[in-house]
Image (cartoon, helix red, strand yellow):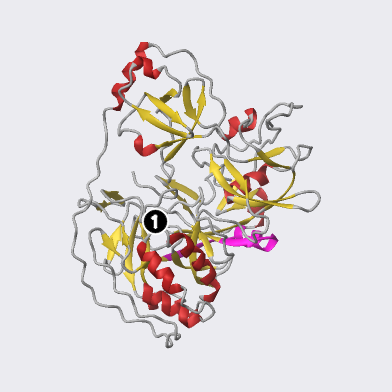
């Protein structure tokens, strides 16, 4: 943590700031409800289970909220979930479940530490023959209930795109053409829990810095506000919409400010962030930031694997290429969702921009030099020309890793791992996806694991297939934008979406409904 310099005590007028913090907020849980009675669905015809199969566990008793296997349907602010039978899933009986078994077991390594229902399911998974397709399918049908995901307008259809692990040429040292730094997480980045900001609070408040955390303080005397560790914070313009509910800040004298934007980082540098490597292409670096991971090939052939570490807290606002009509190509933004319209991208579209995660990103009109800590600028610092204020910082990952590590913290499996919006599809959970292959009408229907997220992945029925690395993966991922449907597998007895008693959806808006299906610190947190 860098040394923060302090100015003399604040004037007495600062005491008035404390009055801004008198408000608060409250949440009332839903009263306990009796389980909803329903007929047991007829199981799909499945061959006899393997000898290691175990009896179907009884669902845990309901103590309030909704329980998977008992609730016929439930809703969040962003999605509605409806129970269906496994044999209604298109292509369920034809899938090769052994291909996804290792990915499922990786998810178990994380989820079994978070919920008793998952711990029990994962314990029983250890007794399943991971090479026996029928045994695995029988395990899923015994242990899980399946729910079709519909968006806030109750439509079952969404968009499925693709992503991959890009490779960029680079160097450990600064030497043209390697002039664009790949930064690690800055040491001066501070974090404020957005839920601690009183409802309706505006203007300037007092924040106390302890380590990397900022807390809002009330009732301070003038002397206390002038002590070390206390700063003023203007709440106006803070981005409070991060899924982990953390606001990214930095100290500037006696003030706390939003962390630097992309333009500020590129024209002023990030002196408190270690440079992992330097690359030769600003657009390629931006694509790697959008993908969330990548590989940097050094001149001697050595490969640096990097994964997502942090983000600057600024909203993701990509500069999207426009169609001949002047409209942004294939993109609509509505509230907190990014909606992708299905379009037919031909080769001319690919040349006009960078296709990535369903977007056709406009190439910068002009790209110039950027600031580099410790390097004297030899040309005007005009920046990369990329207008998106969001900026991603990386970390080096194990060189022996064969694949990227996703937001869940486990290696991604090509063709079986997907990135999702964790508000509606919790990280780690099995998801059956029905879509089509890139630029084709051929069905692609398979069980996947939700093991990653992304700033571009917003919406209830939104999946991003991980295609792996290499030219073929890049080609498939860039051309993947197809209609699709999604079904979420929930362990029987798992409590989800505990809405308030007054929860209701009116014209697509969830009133009194939870934002997260399963709140998870770090990926989706309730207010």
* Residue farthest right in this picture: 300
Residue 180 lies in magenta, yes or no?
A: no
Give me the residue at 63% from left, 32% from top: 266
Decide if residue 489 is in sight here.
Answer: no
Residue 191 lies, with reference to residue 352, above or below; the image says above
Few, some or many residues within 10 Å of mark 1 (<14, 14–19, 20+):
many
User: Does residue 118 appear left or right of residue 455 in this picture?
Assistant: left
Question: Label 1: which residue?
Answer: 424
Is label 1 in a helix, a strand or a loop? loop
User: Does residue 302 appear left or right of residue 292 in this picture?
Assistant: right
Range covered by the magenta-colored residues: 466-486
Q: Which of 182/54 is in front?
A: 54
Give me the residue at 43% from left, 23% from top: 230
Residue 80 image point, x, y percent:
33, 59
User: Does residue 49 appear left or right of residue 167 in this picture?
Assistant: left
Say which quadrant the C terminus sits in. Answer: top left
Residue 51 image point, x, y percent:
44, 86
Q: How many marks?
A: 1
Residue 472 lies in magenta, yes or no?
A: yes
Residue 369 lies, with reference to residue 482, above or below; the image says above
Image quarter of residue 231: top left
Residue 120 lies, with reference to residue 251, above or below; the image says below
């Amino acid at each position: 943590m860098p040394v923060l310099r302090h100015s003399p005590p604040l004037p007495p007028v600062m005491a008035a700031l404390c009055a801004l913090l008198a408000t608060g907020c409250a949440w009332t849980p839903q009263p306990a409800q009796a389980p909803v009675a329903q007929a047991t669905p007829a199981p799909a015809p499945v061959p006899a289970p393997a000898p290691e199969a175990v009896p179907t566990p009884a669902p845990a008793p309901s103590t309030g909220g909704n329980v998977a296997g008992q609730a016929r349907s439930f809703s969040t602010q962003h999605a509605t979930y409806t129970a269906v039978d496994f044999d209604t899933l298109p292509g369920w009986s034809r899938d090769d479940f052994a291909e996804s078994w290792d990915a499922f077991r990786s998810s178990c390594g994380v989820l079994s530490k978070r919920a008793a229902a998952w711990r029990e399911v994962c314990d029983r998974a250890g007794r399943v023959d991971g090479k026996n397709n029928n045994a695995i399918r029988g395990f899923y049908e015994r242990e899980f209930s399946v729910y079709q995901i519909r968006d806030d307008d109750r439509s079952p259809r969404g968009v499925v795109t693709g992503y991959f692990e890009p490779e960029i040429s680079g160097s450990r040292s600064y030497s043209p053409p390697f002039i664009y730094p790949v930064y690690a997480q800055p040491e001066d980045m501070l974090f404020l829990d957005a839920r601690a900001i009183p409802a309706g609070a505006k203007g300037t408040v007092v924040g106390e810095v302890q380590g990397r955390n900022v807390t809002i303080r009330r009732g301070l005397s003038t002397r206390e506000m002038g002590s070390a560790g206390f700063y003023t914070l203007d709440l106006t313009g803070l981005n409070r919409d991060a899924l982990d509910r953390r606001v990214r800040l930095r100290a500037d004298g006696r003030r706390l400010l939003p962390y630097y934007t992309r333009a500020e980082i590129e024209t002023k540098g990030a002196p408190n962030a270690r440079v992992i490597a330097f690359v030769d292409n600003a657009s390629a670096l931006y694509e790697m930031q959008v993908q969330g991971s990548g590989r940097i090939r050094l001149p001697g052939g050595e490969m640096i694997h990097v994964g997502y570490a942090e983000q600057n807290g600024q909203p993701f606002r990509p500069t999207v290429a426009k169609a001949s009509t002047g409209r942004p190509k294939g993109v609509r933004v509505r509230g907190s969702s990014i909606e992708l319209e299905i379009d037919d991208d031909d080769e001319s579209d690919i040349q006009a921009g960078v296709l990535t995660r369903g977007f056709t990103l406009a190439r910068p009109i002009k790209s110039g030099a950027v600031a580099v800590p410790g390097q004297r600028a030899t040309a005007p610092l005009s920046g990369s020309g990329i207008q998106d204020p969001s900026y991603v910082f990386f970390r080096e990952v194990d060189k022996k890793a064969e694949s990227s590590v996703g937001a869940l913290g486990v290696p991604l499996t090509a063709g079986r791992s997907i990135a999702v919006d964790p508000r509606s599809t919790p990280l780690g959970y099995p998801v059956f996806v029905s879509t089509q292959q890139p630029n084709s009408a051929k069905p692609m229907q398979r069980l996947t694991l939700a093991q990653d997220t992304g700033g571009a992945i917003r919406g209830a029925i939104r999946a991003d297939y991980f295609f792996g690395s290499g030219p073929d993966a890049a080609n498939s991922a860039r051309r993947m934008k197809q209609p699709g449907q999604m079904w979420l597998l929930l362990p029987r007895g798992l409590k989800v979406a505990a809405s308030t008693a007054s929860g209701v959806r009116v014209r697509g808006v969830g009133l009194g409904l939870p934002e997260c299906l399963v709140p998870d610190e770090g990926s989706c947190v309730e207010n």
